[in-house]
Amino acid sequence: GQTLNLRVIGGRYHYTAAGQLAQHEDTSTVQLSGDLFSGRWGDDGEWMLGAVGGYSDNQGESRSNMTGTRADNQNHGYAVGLTSSWYQHGNQKQGAWLDSWLQYAWFNNDVSEQDDGTDHYHSSGIIASLEAGYQWLPG
């Protein structure tokens, strides 16, 4: 059947490195994915093709506890891609399975250091994953 998934993640993180560098990060991510097509594969196999999209925002600060120097960072970006799954025995939820996804992501980034202005830059990349396994019911 067709599915639609919404994933929302947020967090506030604080780190200290060797008591000398303090870091603070606020982050949030929203991801939406859903099946586009599905079908049978052989006798009882099943495959699915889906789409995924997302938005992420991050703001942070790093401060030297020794010198007091501070740097701020901010980035936000988007990702779009495809997902696919195959199940050897789709109805039984047993046997071999294969999951994969491929995404393209792009970000706008700002980094500012105390008394030194702000640097703006763009970044992008391709993200891919391939997972395989075998599932069986004990009996």
Image: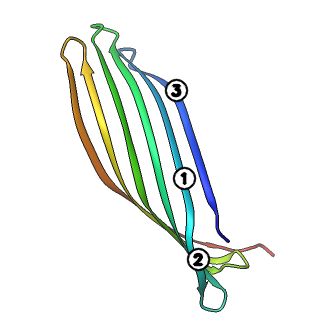
Three-letter amino acid code of the residue under disc 1: Leu
Q: Is residue 107 above or below residue 63?
A: below
**Nearer-N-terminus badge (1/2):** 1
**Whole-number angstrom distance, CA of label 1 to CA of label 2:** 18 Å
Which is more toward the observer, 57 or 60? Answer: 57
Q: Report the disc number at residue 38.
A: 2
Whether residue 130 can be seen here: no
**Whole-number angstrom distance, CA of label 3 to CA of label 2:** 38 Å
Q: What colour-coding does the image apply?
A: rainbow
Three-letter amino acid code of the residue under disc 2: Ser
Which residue was labeled with disc 3? 12
Q: Is residue 29 above or below residue 62?
A: below
Q: Is residue 1 above or below residue 115?
A: below
Q: Please provide percent x and percent y for residue 42.
A: 60, 91
Which residue was labeled with disc 1? 32
Are discs 3 and 2 less than 8 Å apart at CB?
Answer: no
Q: Please provide percent x and percent y for residue 19.
A: 40, 15
Whether residue 33 can be seen here: yes
